[in-house]
Amino acid sequence: MAVAVTIAGAAALLLLTAGNRWSAPAAGAPFIPLCAGLSIVTAISGKEGDYESIKTIASLDDREVRIKYSSEVMSTDLFETQPTLKRSLIQRTVLVADLANARIYYQRFLDQSASTIPGSTAIGTSAAVLRDLRDKGVATLSVSNAYPGLALGADRSKRPNSYDYLQPGKLARVGAGPVAVSVLVNGEEVAVPAIHARGDFSSDKAEFFFVDDERNPLTLSFRIGIDPARPHGAREILRVVKISHACPLASAVAPARALEKALADAGRADLYSIYFSFGSDAIRDESEPALREMAEILQRHADWRLQVAGHTDAAGDDASNLDLSRRRAAAVKDALVRRFAIAAERLTTLGYGEARPVASNETLDGRARNRRVELTRTK
């Protein structure tokens, strides 16, 4: 698996690989590069419906990787009678040296706590942990049990601190080799090779799926605090459903002009990198790269006209979903016209609601794939 070596990220990757034995993944494995712009979307099932958190690599250099975490969650506080939308925008920084050797996976993003926690990773494990699981079958790792509202620093001499809320544990690999985990990578369904591991963290049983690549061992899924009475449930669950990037590299999922090629060859494409606020047609900031790409495509092809169609999952009633899908399609058109000066007559909109699913609405993954924007060339 080749990592995109951009000018900004080359030094970081060289430092990360220095002194480590690097094992190339199997031929034909998908590529998930560690580079600026990499976006990882996690779907979470809540009482009010599914919501998504988005982690984006804002920038990286030879010392650190800077991550932007964004989430919008419907929740009810102690003194509230109705759920309200809670927005979080958190900055985290992971040291490049920790990507190689850290034994702490600080998976929780807290808005009042330290942005840099030396000795930890944030969106996956370290190369050392993955290597131990692959080569020895076991690895030591600590995870965080900190909770929202805590103000935790990274100075061990001042209490409380981030290290006070760690659960040490030991993981054991499940099976003899990698397993396939289905993820949308740049809009295409990909079977990503992952190392499956289970273990105990204090009194909590847990399982993880890490991408089987020491250069970027992202966490694709975890369950922490598994209840034996509910084998598919847990106190804390993460499931990555979409990954996108725009890094120039030879890849099984080539990002370069993939949308443009699909529109040119097939005349249509499903777009999964337009993000909306929960139950709303408000476009989230993380949609900017996709909107800009659409605008640039239309600018390069002055004779093209596009139909923008909105699709939802099956949560909620049919009429509400139909209305929401129509409003979301209109919001995309409005952004292209107002912000990128695309002529309005080149864009038409409609919504299908939940009527045209591409996956099962019974699963978290399936619902995430059904929530999409479809583009069709009409000329």
Image (cartoon, rainbow, N blue to C red):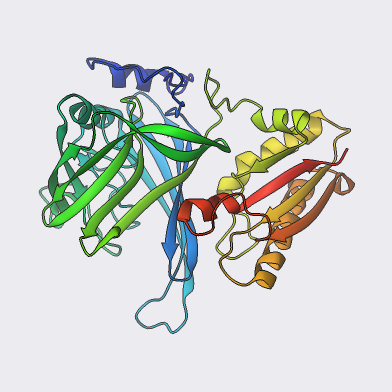
Residue 355, placed above or below residue 116: below
Q: Residue at x 26, y 28 (%)?
A: 127
Q: Nearer the viewer, residue 363 or 131?
A: 363
- Residue 22 seen in the figure: yes
**Quadrant occupied by the C terminus:** top right
Residue at (23% x, 40% y) in the render: 197
| Horizontal relation, residue 265 to residue 362: left or right | right
- Residue 330's x, y, as percent? 75, 57
Q: Residue at x 65, y 61 (%)?
A: 354
Query: Is 72 on the left or on the right of 177, as rendered?
Result: right
Please tell me which residue lies in front, 349 or 26. Answer: 26
Relative depth, front residue between 64 and 79 = 79
Q: Is residue 165 visible?
A: no
Which quadrant of the structure image shows residue 316? bottom right
x and y, in percent, of residue 318 in the image:
66, 70
Relative to 157, residue 93 above or below? above
Image vertical order of residue 84 relative to residue 116, above or below: below
Dividing the picture into quadrants, the one containing residue 262 is top right
